[in-house]
Amino acid sequence: MASAESLTSGSLSSALGRGEDAASWFAGGVVAYASEVKFTVLGVREGPVITADCARQMALGVTALMRSDVSVAVTGVGGPDEEEGHPPGTVYVATHVGGHTQITRHQFPGEPDEVVEATVEAALGQLASELASWSDSESAHQTNPENADR
């Protein structure tokens, strides 16, 4: 599992690293606060970075970089000012689990630290939900007799 984050400045990776037995499942993260880091390290196409597509590209980029099976990425506007025409609190979360990428858009209220906290909570919640769905589908696939030879 790997993470790529912008507005959270390492808070997401820190939260993941505090997880139980993290050394066995967390490869690491990229804090791509500057747009140039998103472009050069994560392979995001140059252009606006507060978009669903940027979040998707960040998730896929860190998946490739860390050779992970699972990733989570966040980009957005922590505040206090707007960026790229988006108001503070605009956040995109992307999870990449089981070859499927899920992207959600959020509008969080509050001061920058509150937006960062809400972003981390949303990203972890989305990741947990996607992992549970993937685990359920993998279990169903493995226990279905029709899939025995696949």
Image (cartoon, grey):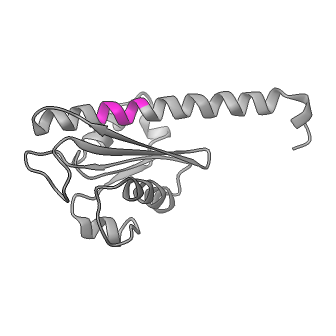
Q: Which region shows up in magenta?
A: 120-125
Determine which quarter of the picture holds residue 26. Answer: top left
Residue at 24 percent of width and 44 percent of height: 90
85 relative to 20 in the view: left or right: left
Quadrant in the rendering for residue 78? top left
The x, y position of residue 7, in whole percent, is 22, 49
**Drawn side of residue 136 relative to residue 109, left or right:** right
- Residue sitting at x 56%, y 48%: 69
Q: Which residue is drawn at 13% across and 36% down?
A: 113
Closer to the camera, 25 or 93? 93
Please tell me whether the stretch drawn in magenta is mainly helix, strand or loop: helix
Residue 67 image offset from top left, x and y in percent: 53, 57
Q: Say if 124 sits above or below 71 in the image.
A: above
Question: Would residue 89 be visible to someone looking at this image?
Answer: yes
Q: In the image, 34: left or right of 81? A: right
Quarter of the figure with residue 89 = top left
Q: Is residue 1 visible?
A: no
**Residue found farthest to the front:** 85
Residue 43 x %, y %: 41, 69
Q: Is residue 124 magenta?
A: yes
- In this orientation, which residue lies closer to the viewer: 27 or 102? 102
